Image: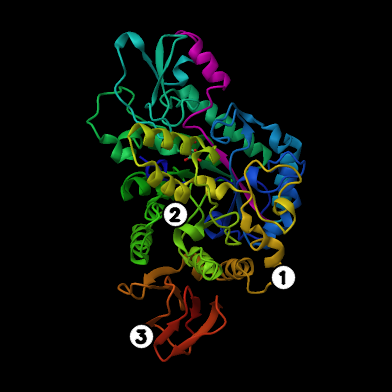
Amino acid sequence: MKYALLLFSALILLSCNQEQDPAISDSGNWWKEGILYQIYPQSFKDTDGDGFGDFKGVIEKLDYIESLGVTMVWMNPFFESPLVDNGYDVSDYRAIHPRYGSMDDFEKMLQGFHDRGIKFVLDVVVNHSSDQHDWFQQSRSSRDNPYRDYYHWWPAEKGEPPYRYSIFDPEGAWEYDSLSNAYYLHYFADAQPDLNWENPKVRQEVQDIMKFWIEKGVDGFRLDAFQFASKDITFPEWPEGHEKDFIKWYGMRPELHDYLREMNEEVLSKFDVFAVAEGAGSSFQDAHDLVDEERKELQMAYHFETVSISRTPEGYTMPELREVLTKWDSAFVDKGWIAIFLANHDNSRLVNRFGNPDPKFRAASTKMLNTLLLSMKGTPYLYFGDELGMTNIDMPTIEEYVDVSALGEYKAAVEQGRDLDDFMKELNYNSRENSRTPMHWDKTKEAGFTTGMPWKKVNENYLEINVENQEQDPNSVLNHLRKMTKLRSDNPVLVYGKYKLIDKEDQHVYAFSRILDQEKFIVLLNFSSENSSLSNPEISSKQEVLINNHQGISIDGNTVDLLPYQALVLKDTE
Ligand code: GLC
């Protein structure tokens, strides 16, 4: 089973008690009104030639980040770690991996964001730690160690523990450890033992870690894999095939809400910070319970249903996407708030998954997708490189992969006797390594990312797709994104306006409106590589054209003719 199929969730952010940032309104809802840019730090910009991105590289690019018109940045983990899962295996939550720089560099970078009115969101990986964390080293050392209950152990004298699926490990989620003759639980890799959230000491440790970073000035937290923090720790036998409904069986126990309320009371409510949990549970009820303001848990959730519709090379259809986004919007009309994303470090590239990477359509379809992200209700999460239309990389053989998830999936495919050619085609399309290749800054060697040997090979198409080229072209994907972020920041209707489909049937044109008080915006997106036409009484040639990702526009009366992947945002002026 694919890792990607299993993770469907939500985020939370917190913001620090610092002065109000200039770019953000003082409504207290900056996390609703903001636009988030996600930075995968090892792939953004290297300044010391070791081939890994670093904080100094981010500092060098602060003006660029600001120029995108984003108001929040979420950075993937940069803590001390053996890097089995690229930093999602933390061995010291208060220390920075030297690859990224020092604490002093971190503080300078954070100050640089704040000086530009950009809030900083920290990735908190506390469903599990690294097996190299001191807590785990102590925990495994003996059954009576005070840290024993920081993790989940099954004594071997009870026999083999009941089967548990592991997202990364085809051998399952229990690992035998001879030191204390017991098995420990790891939902991800065996180097990522799950923390025991039933233990109040663990929860206290996490709260202390959050406060440590709040004191440094961070504004928000993304709680990694958080829906799995609470599990049935009586570990009963479960029916065969249960793992297909992974979240239901493996996480989202009622106690999770108690833990979140406690975190809210002890940490979140005390500062101007926000938190978003990866994973929104397995039902709307779960999602609501996480973000209902009255329950005082989290501020935002992100679900995985959208990204899960396009996981195979066969692709998806626009009506499926429309249905998922509409369904989730309607579930949050009255209460709660969600994030909107179509790509991140766990998915392949935006344009390959949802657009058309053919050079003829790449730019137009990326602009169209960015138009969608920035005109939906919910906080938009943009992934670095998608502002340029960066694409997947071709990696047809398993030897090229380093990701623990890809390697685990391959091992499982071999064990299951799958057709490995088919498997590799799927992996090549779907692997999250696609979105982890270095950023394309310019046309120099290694795309200006590093003067050394990049940790991951740079996509060959960097000579064409890069910041330098796109800065010079007023119609580039990059400049289109800037127009869209400005439009959203200038128009509360795009943040708070009611979302309504104006056409529910068309197979190619995704057409919706956003309405706030007297203001009405119409968004028309042609998801086809062919021309498409749509007639609708809500469309009119009198409407003002705010955004058009093509040169021409054709509206006659109530009929619009759209070019391939054309995206329009119109304003009703009547
Ligand atoms: C989350 C992260 C992913 C990581 C996993 C284990 O899903 O987004 O990158 O591998 O958790 O921490």
Q: Which mark is residue 472?
A: 1
Residue depicted at 60% across the width and 48% down the height: 437
Residue under label 3, please give it.
Answer: 537
- Name the element at disc 1: helix
Magenta region, residue range: 117-146
Between residues 157 and 516, which one lies in front from this camera angle?
157
Does residue 341 lie above or below 409 as drawn?
Answer: below
Instruction: Identify the image quadrant of residue 152.
Output: top left
Amino acid on which disc 3 is placed:
Pro
Mark 1 surroundings: few (<14), some (14-19) or many (≥20) residues within 10 A: few
Mark 3 to mark 2 CA distance (whole Å): 30 Å
Q: How many marks?
A: 3
Residue under label 2, please give it.
Answer: 338
Mark 2 surroundings: few (<14), some (14-19) or many (≥20) residues within 10 A: many
Amino acid on which disc 1 is placed:
Gln
In the image, the residue with mark 2 has its CB under 8 Å from the nearest atom of ligand 1: no
